[in-house]
Image: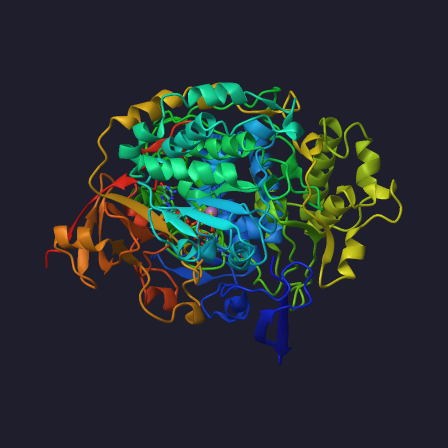
Amino acid sequence: MCGLRIRVEGGTAVDVRGNAEDVWSRGHICPKGATLGHLHDDPDRLRLPMVRTPDGGFREVDWPEAYDEVERLLRPVLAEHGARAMTVYVGNPVAHNLGLATYIGALVGMAGAAGMPAYYSPGTVDQWPLNVVSALLFGGMWNAPIPDLSRTDYLMVLGANPAVSQGSMLSAPDVVGSLAAIRRRGGKVVVVDPRRTETAARASAWVPIRPGTDALLLFALLRALVEGGAISEAPHLKGKVLGLEEAIALSEPFSPERVSAATGVDAGTIRSLAAELAAADRPVLYSRIGLCTQEFGTLATWLVFVLNVALGSVDRLGGALFTKPAVWSPMFMKPPDQTTDRWEFGRFFSRVSGAPEVLGQFPVGCLAEEIDTPGDGQIRALICVAGNPVVSAPGSRRLDEALPRLDVMICVDNWLNETTRHADVILPGLSPLERAHADDLYWMYATASCVKWSEPVFAERPDRPGEWELLLRLAGAALGTPVPDVDVAAMDDLYVQGLVATACATEGTPLTGRDAAAAFASLEGRGPERLVDLGIRLGPWGDDLGVRPGGLTLADVRRHPDGLWLADLDEGRLDDAVTTPSGCIELIHPQIVDDIPRLAARLDRESPPLVLTSRRHLRSNNSWMHNVPALMRGRERCTLLVHPDDARDLGLSDATSATVETDGGSVDVVVQVSAEMMPGVVSLPHGWGHGRPGTMLAVANAHPGVNANVLNPVGVVDVPSSTHVVNGVPCRVRPRSS
Ligand SMILES: Nc1nc2c(c(=O)[nH]1)N[C@H]1C(S)=C(S)[C@@H](COP(=O)(O)OP(=O)(O)OC[C@H]3O[C@@H](n4cnc5c(=O)[nH]c(N)nc54)[C@H](O)[C@@H]3O)O[C@H]1N2
Ligand SMILES: Nc1nc2c(c(=O)[nH]1)N[C@H]1C(S)=C(S)[C@@H](COP(=O)(O)OP(=O)(O)OC[C@H]3O[C@@H](n4cnc5c(=O)[nH]c(N)nc54)[C@H](O)[C@@H]3O)O[C@H]1N2
Ligand SMILES: [Mo]
């Protein structure tokens, strides 16, 4: 989302820097953004399709040969077992790649129509609890209010490290700068995290917490606020919230004194945090992945919003505000398989371990067993789009062993890495400089309403398909057309016609009740451009497909390479933003309340002596930017952070090797003794474990690190959301025996 200035000389991007004129980012840029030129030039980046050879290696082929090979391998599976035997893995870069983001719905939707039962994504090691809570409380799975960073005077950050991640499900141009500004204007930033993170180091206070116990802390904060008489119905929320009284009643068993042993936060600290929240003019809580991928991810995430409601902070300046994205997205609609008024989860179960679907997915850790367990419904064909689950999914060792047993694995990916080395065919996309760019998902969480479009830096290559075309081709194949024969343009029309027709037939969209054929006919162009144009025109500033002359279209936006800044966030948006059946924020749901006894049982359970957590780094993006030399300089980053007291007790010393063991597996890793950890908690970054045979990542393989997900067991999940627990996993650490 950061605006870039890219200087090109002789066909090379010689300089990439922040664009000071950009209406959104005003010159801000992170170390990752500056490397787009390196990604483009990376000699290991795939430019041609790769096909597996009988000796287990790969050879480059041209596109027609690649399509023939996909057809040769995929068709027998579909013919014999149907689409039931296939699945799709939707990796994280799908969300920040325009072509993939706009067309992944075509592949997943059409394969689903052909009979594919479920698909997989890292959502279930990421934000699934937030999606569940957003759906239930606010009506849409991508619809949650974000902290108003520029006006709050008290920000509590739980389980997020925006100084590194730059904010997650919270898009702001310069989060570190925003946090500093809160403090400069006399406000406070409090970070709740088992590690004194880069964010905590810049905050007013750090509150260490035992991993997985935030729901207890948050319930206790609610209790203390209620007992202190600090909760009264905010006038602007009157008649707009259902269930606050019940939520307060549910907090009864969780007094500060009662939760203090389990959380490791003493009752006095909890009471003074509550007093600070009560005294602040514009307090707001914000949480992310550390509160999602933990034992009580849904309850913890839910309680963040319960507290924001109880404090009167929702929909109020300086509190938690609903955004107003300039571009309408099909993602704003309920998934088409959610057919009733209420959100329903657990409508079907995974074949092997009986995991319930949540929002159409099973926990990603189930993928391996669905592939390697014979029987009716076994997965035999996998299409992996921009994902590296061998590194990113819990239980990764089993997945690494299962993938070679597939009848066919097709990857849409730009590198030959830990996952794609198992593919039969790899179909590469274009480089970030060879394709147009616009964001959609991330504007839904942005601190301002802006719209931008970036043209490709280097001309699109007529000899190479865009990734969106690859997805449509694979979708056509799932529907029965031989891969080489798929008419991509016709598929594109079919998909967009379907989207438009769905929007016309769905309540509460900008197209509700309108004529689908006429709406479709008013669109121009093809591919991602047509869909972005549709979104801009249907957005709040758009021309409404001609109904509002003078309103925005993509053509207007293209005339503003520095972007168009449309509005600040504002309050008073509840009626627009909340799409629950009642039109109110609905706090109470069986999916949530039924999980509270499980939380209560945690109170008297003894805490394990040592638990494992995850972390991220600034010069890294999950598993896939380790091949950029400029990001890999400096000291080794894949280290196990251990508190000095634990190191002493365990006989570990800095820079030596230790064995970490869990019920999931074990790895050997370099120890980094650090007082930034709370005692009893160790931290290992995710996204490492390179250096595997058959990969082509010269730089990453020279700094392999270890794969944290070998350690994370698949069976441990946050129950309501079926999300994996990768924070708070009991572990044992000992010096590595030589
Ligand atoms: N530079 C960079 N930026 C990134 C990424 C990257 O890899 N590198 N990844 C991107 C992606 S895909 C995502 S999803 C976002 C994630 O963005 P964030 O959610 O900000 O992610 P992390 O930096 O992993 O921060 C999670 C924090 O939770 C803490 N934590 C662990 N367990 C608990 C717990 O039980 N309770 C509490 N309170 N805290 C806990 C961890 O110590 C850690 O500090 O970042 C995105 N941005
Ligand atoms: N233990 C632990 N595990 C975690 C997490 C954690 O905090 N702890 N975090 C989880 C989170 S939040 C996430 S999002 C996931 C990430 O999980 P994944 O999405 O599976 O993994 P990434 O590392 O993002 O891998 C991205 C893949 O996309 C490819 N790629 C990059 N750019 C492009 C492109 O432009 N086009 C195409 N076609 N391919 C491209 C890369 O080569 C790589 O194969 O990991 C999750 N796993
Ligand atoms: Mo993520």
Q: Is residue 713 above or below residue 58?
A: above
Nearer to me, 75 or 669: 669
Q: Tell me, what colour scheme is on the image?
A: rainbow
Residue furthest right in the image:
549
Residue at 10 percent across and 56 percent down: it is 737
Q: Quadrant of residue 111?
A: top right
Residue furthest left in the image:
738
Side (left or right) of 285 relative to 553: left
Q: Is residue 734 visible?
A: yes
Q: Quadrant of residue 405?
A: top left
Q: Is residue 362 visible?
A: no
Marker count (numbered)? 0
Q: Quadrant of the N terminus?
A: bottom right
Q: Quadrant of residue 523?
A: top right
Q: Position of residue 237 (x, y in %)?
A: 64, 28
Nearer to me, 619 or 364: 619
Side (left or right) of 580 relative to 656: right
Residue at 52 percent across and 71 percent down: it is 41
Q: Quadrant of the C terminus?
A: bottom left
Q: Position of residue 345 (x, y in %)?
A: 49, 24
Nearer to me, 648 or 50: 648
Q: Position of residue 697 (x, y in %)?
A: 39, 64
Side (left or right) of 611 relative to 369: left
Q: Position of residue 723 (x, y in %)?
A: 41, 35
Q: Is residue 330 above or below residue 484?
A: above
Nearer to me, 663 or 671: 671
